[in-house]
Image: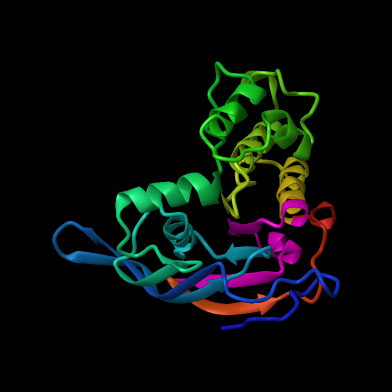
Amino acid sequence: MENREIFPGREAGEGRTGTPLFRASSITKFYHQGTQTEVRALDGVDLELFDGELAVLLGASGSGKSTLLNILGGLDIPTGGRLFYREDELTGADEDLLTAFRRNSVGFVFQFYNLIPSLTARENVALVTEIAPDPMSPEEALELVGLGDRMDHFPSQLSGGQQQRVAIARAIAKRPEVLLCDEPTGALDVKTGITVLEAVEKVNRELGTLAVVITHNAAIADMADRVIFLSAGKITSIRGNERRMPARSLSW
């Protein structure tokens, strides 16, 4: 598995080195449909993800990328293989450890924003900051994603891109080491999608958060340190970009 001393697209000294944040070995995930059919969502995945990188998992619908993301985030468990987060093995972990892992270490962003309609942007973010051990303030999180002037707006008063940026603020307000984004631009037009990707990019750059973005959109791969290609439940290749393209320069 590729382990670069300096991630491509960063200046010397900005790369991440050392022990991977995630280590996945021979991860499988099987589902049964009815009594006969076995669906292999993941089939022998080996992967390392490093602190501070921005990785894109790229593949068509049904390639296994959402299943892999859910396993990385402790939302699902593999059928086989081993998964480590730092020195902790998540495979076989009890629910208390997985809950603590999700609560303290991982922020999730999904295609649909899952905001509470009756709460303002500030109040939606505060739902996380009230239970996190060392959170940033809701105001700081919203400023980070460019919504300092929309804090007291309700979701119905925000555009789709603004709602997604509130979701990102909510995810990063607890200062997670990992930000997992499942098709964060899937429901958005190009211009709006780029503003969301700029927010992810800024979180990765300024907080040093490992950001993993899954998408079927090949254009988004250009903003990554590494692109991990999935097909039929397998990683088919991993490409390191020579230089990360800024999100604002992307088009599709």
Q: How many marks?
A: 0
Please say whether residue 86 is one of the residues in the magenta stretch. Answer: no
How far across and down, in percent of the image, does residue 211 sit? Answer: 64, 57
Q: Is residue 166 left or right of residue 113?
A: right
Residue 160, position as x, y percentages in the image:
66, 32
Residue at the extreme left of the image, as rendered? 35
The image shows residue 40 at horizontal and vertical percentages of 33, 68
Residue 63 or 88: which is nearer the viewer?
88
Against 204, residue 157 (above or below) is: above
Of residue 69 and residue 177, the one placed in the foreground of this image is 177
Residue placed at 30% from the left, 55% from the top?
94
Q: What residue do we see at 55% from left, 33% from top?
A: 128
Query: Looking at the image, which residue sits at the far bottom?
Result: 1
Query: In the rendered image of this protein, does residue 102 appear above or below residue 164?
Result: below
The residue that appears at 55% across and 16% down in the rendered structure is 118
- Is residue 200 left or right of 116 when viewed as pictured? right
* Residue 215 is a magenta residue: yes
Residue 193 or 240: which is nearer the viewer? 240
Magenta residues span 205-232
Up-down relation of residue 46 to residue 208 (above or below): below
Name the residue nearer the viewer: 158 or 37: 158
Q: Quadrant of the C terminus?
A: bottom right
- Position of the N terminus, as image quadrant, is bottom right
251 with respect to 21 (left or right): right
The percent position of residue 31, horizontal first and vertical second, equals: 27, 61
Colouring style: rainbow
Corner quadrant of residue 251: bottom right
